[in-house]
Image (cartoon, rainbow, N blue to C red):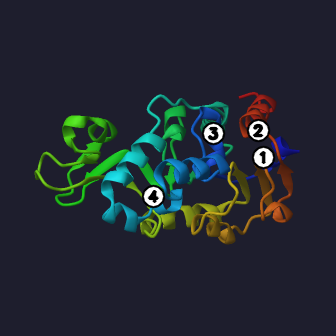
C-alpha cells in the first residue's frame, strides 16, 4: 500500500528529523540518554546549551558541547538517506525537508534538501561575515580555548550556520518548506517525534490527501496519518525502494 501511494502521487514530500540519522550513529541529543549526559557532564540541558543566550554568555562551554556532541565527521549516510536519494532521483519524491544539520542527505545524493535548522558544514564570522568550512572550527590553531576566531578580521567569533534555540528560522528556508508542503498531495513524515517547533508546525500547511508516518515511537500526529509504521525507518524505506525496483 505504501508503494502504491507513492506511485499514484503527483507530488510527494519527505519531512524528517533526528531519527533519520540515528542509524548513522548520530545520537539524538534530546533523547533520555542525551539529556542525562548533558546534565551530568555539562550541568545544563541540551536546550540551554544550544540556546542563543547560552552561546552569547558562555561561548567556551557552548563550543565544547557543540564540537563534542553535534559534529560527527565520520558519520556516513545510512539506508534511509540512500533510499530517499533514490526516490528523488526516480522522481517519486520532490523534496526532503530536514530538521537535521548533519548534511547526510546531500552526502547520499539528495538534491532538493531544505535544511530547516541550517547545517554544521557551514560556518561564518559574526563580525565580518567571512565564510568558513567545518574543519576551520575544529583546528586548535583557529580557536581561543574552544572558541573559533576569524583570521580575516582577527576578532570575530566564527559560529556554525545553524539555528539555535531562541533564534528564528531563516525566512527563505521557511518559505521554501512551507511551499513544498502546501504543494504536496502526499507527505511522508519520518524519524521525528514532531515535538520541535516551529518546524513541526509546518505540517498544518499540508493540503494533500495522504500522510505516511514512520517513527519508532508514537507521535501526536499518528491519528492524522493514513499509514503509521513504528519500525526502523531505514528498513522501511529500503523495502519501498525494493518494491519500486530502484
Report helix, strand or loop for mark 3.
helix
With respect to residue 99, does 51 lie above or below?
below
Dot 2 and dot 1 residues touching (CB under 8 Å): yes
Task: Please indicate whether residue 244 sits to the left or right of residue 202 in the image.
Answer: right
Q: What whole-number distance in Å separates the C-alpha atoms at marks 1 and 4?
A: 27 Å
- The image quadrant of residue 171 is bottom left
Of the two numbered discs 1 and 4 on the same chain, state the one appearing first in sequence: 4
Report helix, strand or loop for mark 2.
loop
Residue at 57 percent across and 49 percent down: it is 29
Q: What whole-number distance in Å separates the C-alpha atoms at marks 4 and 2?
A: 29 Å
Of the two numbered discs 4 and 3 on the same chain, state the one appearing first in sequence: 3
Residue 2: image x %, image y %? 83, 45
In the rendered structure, find residue 216 and report the number of the disc placed on it.
1
User: Few, some or many C-alpha atoms within 10 Å of disc 3 (few <14, some 14-19, many ≥20)?
Assistant: few
In the rendered structure, find residue 149 and report the number of the disc placed on it.
none
With respect to residue 36, does 167 lie above or below?
below
Residue under label 4, please give it. Answer: 49
Of the two numbered discs 4 and 2 on the same chain, state the one appearing first in sequence: 4
Residue at 49 percent across and 58 percent down: it is 44
| Tag nearer the camera, 4 or 2 | 4
Please state, as top left, top right, bottom left or bottom right, where the C terminus lies in the image: top right
Of the two numbered discs 2 and 3 on the same chain, state the one appearing first in sequence: 3
Q: What whole-number distance in Å separates the C-alpha atoms at marks 2 and 3?
A: 10 Å
Amino acid at each position: 500500500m505504501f508503494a502504491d501511494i507513492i506511485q499514484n502521487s503527483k507530488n510527494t514530500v519527505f519531512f524528517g528529523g533526528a531519527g533519520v540519522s540515528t542509524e548513522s550513529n548520530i545520537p539524538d541529543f534530546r533523547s533520555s540518554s542525551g539529556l542525562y549526559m548533558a546534565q551530568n557532564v555539562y550541568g545544563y540541558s541540551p536546550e540551554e546549551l544550544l540556546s542563543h543566550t547560552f552561546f552569547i554568555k558562555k561561548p567556551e562551554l557552548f563550543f565544547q558541547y557543540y564540537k563534542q556532541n553535534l559534529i560527527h565527521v565520520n558519520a556516513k549516510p545510512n539506508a534511509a538517506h540512500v533510499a530517499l536519494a533514490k526516490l528523488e532521483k526516480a522522481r517519486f519524491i520532490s523534496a526532503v525537508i530536514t530538521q537535521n544539520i548533519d548534511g547526510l542527505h546531500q552526502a547520499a545524493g539528495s538534491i532538493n534538501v531544505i535544511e530547516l535548522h541550517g547545517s554544521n558544514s557551514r560556518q561564518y564570522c559574526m563580525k565580518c561575515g567571512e565564510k568558513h568550512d567545518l574543519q576551520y572550527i575544529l583546528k586548535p590553531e583557529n580557536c581561543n580555548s574552544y572558541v573559533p576566531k576569524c583570521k580575516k578580521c582577527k576578532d570575530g567569533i566564527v559560529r556554525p550556520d545553524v539555528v539555535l534555540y531562541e533564534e528564528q528560522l531563516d525566512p527563505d528556508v521557511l518559505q521554501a518548506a512551507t511551499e513544498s508542503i502546501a504543494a504536496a498531495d502526499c507527505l511522508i513524515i519520518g524519524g521525528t517525534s514532531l515535538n520541535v517547533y516551529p518546524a513541526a508546525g509546518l505540517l498544518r500547511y499540508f493540503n494533500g490527501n495522504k500522510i505516511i508516518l514512520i517513527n519508532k515511537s508514537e507521535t501526536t500526529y499518528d491519528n492524522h496519518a493514513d499509514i503509521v509504521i513504528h519500525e526502523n525507518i531505514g528498513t522501511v524505506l529500503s523495502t519501498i525502494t525494493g518494491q519500486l525496483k530502484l
